[in-house]
Amino acid sequence: MLRWCFLCGLFEQNGGSRVLLSQIELSDFRNYERAACSPAPGINVVTGENAAGKTNFLEAVYFALCGGSFRSSRENEVVRFGAEKAIIRACVSMDGFTVNTAAEVRSDGKTLVLNGKDGQKRDFPGRRRTLLFRPEDLEVLTGPPAGRRRFIDQIFFGLVPAYEEAHRQFYRALQQRNALLRLGRGMVPETGEFKTWTDACVTYGTRLCRLRLNGLALFAPAAASIYRQLTGTKIFLRYVRSIGGGESEAEVRELFYVKLHGLLAQELRYGHTMAGPHRDDFIFMLKDNDLRRHGSRGEQRTAVLAMKLAEAGLLEKSTDDRIVYLLDDVFSELDRRRRQALLENIVGRQAFITATETPIAADGAVYRVENGKICRTGTEPT
């Protein structure tokens, strides 16, 4: 019989911050008219039939920790049909202090409260301390390159010094250059302004390429290590630059200029810059094959999960904080060994995991969602 390798609540503390959700109450949130529970400080498994409301509960936990929804930009959708407003109240501990969070969502907006005072989303205790995995994240691997760039960029913002500033500078220069290409109407802009913004694109784009390599030097081995823990096989994350190879920064810069010069006629026709970091891609390779095209659903899901866990691990290492894990349907398409390896990887963290059934013998808390109620195994519904 597989068992979870920890005792709930008995975690080694190595300094830094640890966020724990100790109480949550819902009112008219999605399919919950009234619900409340006191999560364990370790792993919490939320079980139930499909469409019972497991993901809704996970969304409520995210709302309590981060001050918003992960599912929709129209947050008034969380209000239960026929109700005027949804309310999420929670008790969160951090660094030995208690933070009472509350969110009231109405059709015309929402109100956030921290310890009885008006609050801002950026001040919620789970911001940058919450890891979310959901089935839709598979799009990061299987979808278009833009999604992978966004995903990697978000990781590197918190991991690589100066990355966010280089990213901002490049995209500002790119926007200006694209505007001039559109104004050119098929003719090469004769103003010095076009050269200025081309130079800026090359300068900041070259810097961004270098910082991406710096980030990959940290992130790729971490993701590969976790994937190997979960599967016993190796993967490799490859960075594919739209301007081609080049080892030194000077070589990359020269390649960038050459590429832009060769593409200028097409760029004038289409009105946008056709090479640079905004056209790069990141590819997971498994046994010399592109995992996106040749991997099974289970392999693809595990790769995305490995990336998420690597992101959390590197963030914990850089901040000395402990992350709260929200894992939606994470066990689907993972065999018994991979499930065990995943649980071993998140020992010592509070986690909320949804599943259609209890996946293994559970030493943590197990909840059952049914008919808009949530109850801990062996207790009455609340």
Image: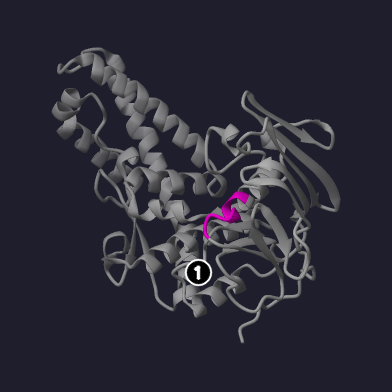
Find residue 372 and report its horizontal and vertical position in percent: 65, 52
Find residue 47 and report its horizontal and vertical position in percent: 61, 64
Find residue 294 and report its horizontal and vertical position in percent: 27, 65
Which residue does the image show at 81% across and 52% down from the upper left?
95
The quarter of the displayed image where residue 298 is located: bottom left
Q: Foreground: 262 or 110?
A: 110
Q: Relative to residue 100, is residue 52 depicted above or below? A: below
Q: Foreground: 178 or 27?
A: 27
Which residue does the image show at 40% across and 32% down from the upper left?
170
- Give, as a single range, the part of the protein colored magenta: 50-56
Using residue 327 as the reference point, say whether residue 200 is left or right of it: left
Q: Residue furthest bottom?
A: 1
Using residue 56 as the reference point, say whether residue 134 is left or right of it: left
Q: Relative to residue 265, is residue 89 depicted above or below? A: below
Find residue 39 and report its horizontal and vertical position in percent: 75, 59
Q: Foreground: 360 or 186?
A: 360
Quarter holding the C terminus? bottom right
Q: Is 263 included in the stretch rendered in magenta? A: no
Reading the image, the residue beneath label 1 is 226
Which residue does the image show at 47% across and 67% down from the upper left?
332
Q: Residue 320: in sight, yes or no?
A: no
Q: Residue 291: in sight, yes or no?
A: yes
Q: Amino acid at mark 1?
A: Ile
Q: Secondary structure at mark 1?
A: helix
